[in-house]
Image: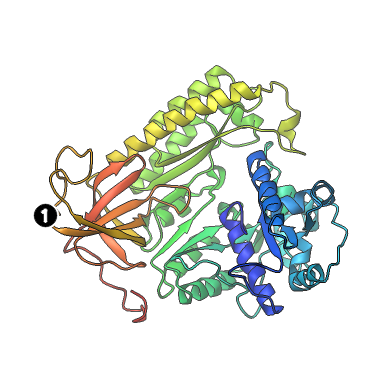
Amino acid sequence: MTLGCARNEVDSEELAARLEAGGWRVADGQADVVLVNTCGFIKAAKQESIDELLGAADSGSPVVAAGCLAERYGSELAGALPEAQVLSFDDYADIGTRLDEVLAGKRWPAHEPRDRRRLLPIAPAGRRAVTDLPDGLAPPSGPRVLRRRLADGVVAPLKIASGCDRRCSFCAIPAFRGAFLSRAPAEVLAEGNWLAAHGARELVLVSENSTSYGKDLGDLRLLESLLPRLAAVPGIDRVRVSYLQPAELRPGLIEVLAGTPGVASYFDLSFQHASGPVLRAMRRFGDGDRFRALIEQIRGLDPEAGIRSNFIVGFPGETEQDLAELEGFLGDARLDAIGIFGYSDEDGTEAATLGGQLDAQEIASRVEELAALADELMAQRAADRIGEVHEVLIEESAHSAGEITGAGRPGAEAPRHELVGQPVGRYVGRGAHQAPEVDGCTEVLASRPLAIGDLVRVRVVESEGVDLVAVPNEGSERDRRPDWPDAVG
């Protein structure tokens, strides 16, 4: 069971490959052991992980807790949750043996948490010479790809780095994920080719901070050169980059993201707030004006670029004026996707010690206010996209919709497309501005069959909240790539 972010999904698939090599297999039904890859990011995620561990224990099978929550709390979690055995990242190399021991009824003492940033040199350049790394600190490397796909979708995350060197006052991730460490480009390309051979058509590059990629390898522009090479992998239609730090977003990287064929013009920008004083307290870069200028720079290169961001409200010391600045920024930014999160103290972080803490009720009220505004603004941005032509990767095939008649869809004022009176099928996919899981999707209404994995050129005809409705833009659909095998369609 996997909880949390796409980085955890990759970790689970690496664990599955190690387990398979050790003689284990993923169970379709009742399992001998339940392995839960937990999330330890914020309070709500930690509670979800605990609930899943308790639910897994109800199955009657032994339960093992891995992942961020397990690494972060170690023996404390084991003491509070005797239903589960607790693993460290350092146990990953011997995960098969560990599960053998669980099946044999053996228990072992859980680890004592440590600051994993101290396992590597402080200077990024010094990390290149480190070869004896604790397992789990860095992405795996070796003569073969260490991964087993646990899902059969056409989108797959691809980890390009692990850890983080930033010191945001609200975030505990660097302490238990470790310092930033890039994977070698050759390893990333090898895994990209492997994923393409195993059904992936879109690669989502994940890390704790993708804009830092290459700094420990001596090349801060390494991502700019890697992206076109990944986009050229046979069978891959789209490469998407997630987790971009505004403070590190270079003009050259913006140009590559906005103008490279096969690379999604998509900017997952970690703004977190728009008030300068709040951002300084968060130990982060920028303010509303700088962020507006960055967005203007992106849209100057590609007016249709997708931009999303997350924001924390209720941070210690946040005033009504700070909140008003954030509201004004959101109104100006025209973001495609907006995540609003309420601040909560995290163990071991500087923010937990700051004055000006707001009570939970006030934070909840601010979240509700900003979330309502975000929903309205995202719906407006989606409506602005009506008439645009997008390339949509088909991910799901819905049931046949019968015939489109009258105004088409319920609530439509007039038919906006040319399918009236025609039998259609409904398909769900995503355009370049829509990331999996966190953003909206596009429903494609087509009078001819489409297949999962097709990249279809469409014209947007309607919007429903953050989601879009589109029809094939006949005569302009991109031809199938000549390097695709016949089995891929």
Residue farthest right in this picture = 109
Q: Residue furthest top?
A: 320
Residue located at (72% from left, 55% from top): 57
SS label for mark 1: loop
Q: Quadrant of residue 351?
A: top right
* Residue 11 in the image, given as x and y percentages of width and height: 64, 63
Evaluate whether residue 273 shows in this view: yes
Q: Residue at x 43, y 33 (%)?
A: 374
Residue 344: percent from the left, percent from the top? 66, 33
Residue drawn at x 15%, y 54% is 419
* Apparent side of residue 304 relative to residue 130 in the rendered image (left or right): left
Q: Residues within 10 Å of mark 1 (few under 14, many from 20)?
A: few
User: Where is residue 311, by image quadrant?
Assistant: top right
**Residue 360 coordinates in the image, percent (x, y):** 64, 25
Answer whether residue 179 is visible to the viewer in this image. no
Relative depth, front residue between 203 and 373: 373
